[in-house]
Image (cartoon, helix red, strand yellow):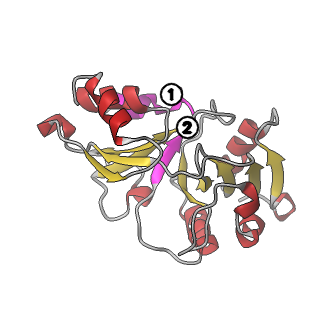
Amino acid sequence: MVSAEDRTRVISAASGTARKELQRCVSAGGVVVFPSDGLYGLACDPLDVSAIARIHRLKGRDEGKSSAVMYFSPLAMRELVAGLGPRTAAVVSALLPGPVTLVVANPGHRYPLACREDVGRLGIRLLAGPLAGAMCPVFQTSANLSGEPPPGKFADVPASVIAGADLAIDGGELTGLPSTVVDIATIEEDGGWEILRQGALSPGDLASALASVGLG
């Protein structure tokens, strides 16, 4: 766990140290407020039970929902991608990085704390932008209080969430749009996919990207 004197350090996403500070904080068991592509999120080590519990306390309650694991570098995803089927890997290549969460088959039961009850399926993201290149995968969820809208501006992240984090990265105003969530967990068996939540990527652009790899 990071020490008390490191609590709630606020830095700019544009600073040259943001990526390293994110890695340092996560590897030390800390919780980070960070800018994704559309909304602000909370992040921690996806294998750290205590850090994930802290995130749920900051949000107000544990809603029992699964969360995605976010990557900031394709290199950090190599082992995961190597275990995916060819169709799934093609979709990952076509859509990530981007404002998309892909729900993939997870036969190895990776990151069970993010999967919750359904360890056979895992949500994954790959983020571009100022934090790109960080090698630590993170458990991520929106930086809002339970029942409140997720913030698209750093100024709108609740003060209690900022105060309870170890590091807060200010990326200014984002798009305010959530990622589009696409379930491709059965795509190897039947070629099927389903939009679970409409977000920043339009259905048309999604269909075009999937068609480009023969899955439209």
| Residue 136 horizontal/vertical position (percent) | 59, 40
74 or 174: nearer the viewer? 174
| Residue 183 horizontal/vertical position (percent) | 29, 47
- On the image, which quarter does residue 84 sit in? top left
In this rendering, the answer to whether 33 lies above or below 65 is above
| Residue 134 horizontal/vertical position (percent) | 64, 34
Measuring 48% from the left and 45% from the top, which residue is drawn there? 200
Q: Which mark is residue 180?
A: none
Q: Main secondary structure of the magenta part?
A: helix
- On the image, which quarter does residue 108 sit in? top left
Neighbour tally class for label 2: few under 14, some 14-19, many 20 plus, Cα within 10 Å: many
In reply to whether residue 72 is colored magenta, the answer given is yes
List the residue tagged with mark 1: 74
Q: Is residue 39 left or right of residue 21?
A: left
Secondary structure at badge 2 equals loop
Measuring 41% from the left and 66% from the top, which residue is drawn there? 65
Q: Amino acid at mark 2?
A: Leu
Q: Is residue 136 left or right of residue 14?
A: left
16 or 206: nearer the viewer? 206
- Which quarter shows the C terminus? top left
Neighbour tally class for label 1: few under 14, some 14-19, many 20 plus, Cα within 10 Å: some
**Tag 2 or tag 1, which sits nearer the N-term?**
1
Q: Which mark is residue 127?
A: 2
The residue stretch that appears in magenta: 68-82
Q: CA distance from mark 1 to mark 2?
A: 9 Å
Q: Amino acid at mark 1?
A: Pro
In this rendering, the answer to whether 38 lies above or below 128 is below
14 or 42: nearer the viewer? 14
Secondary structure at badge 1 equals helix
On the question of residue 89 being in view, the answer is no
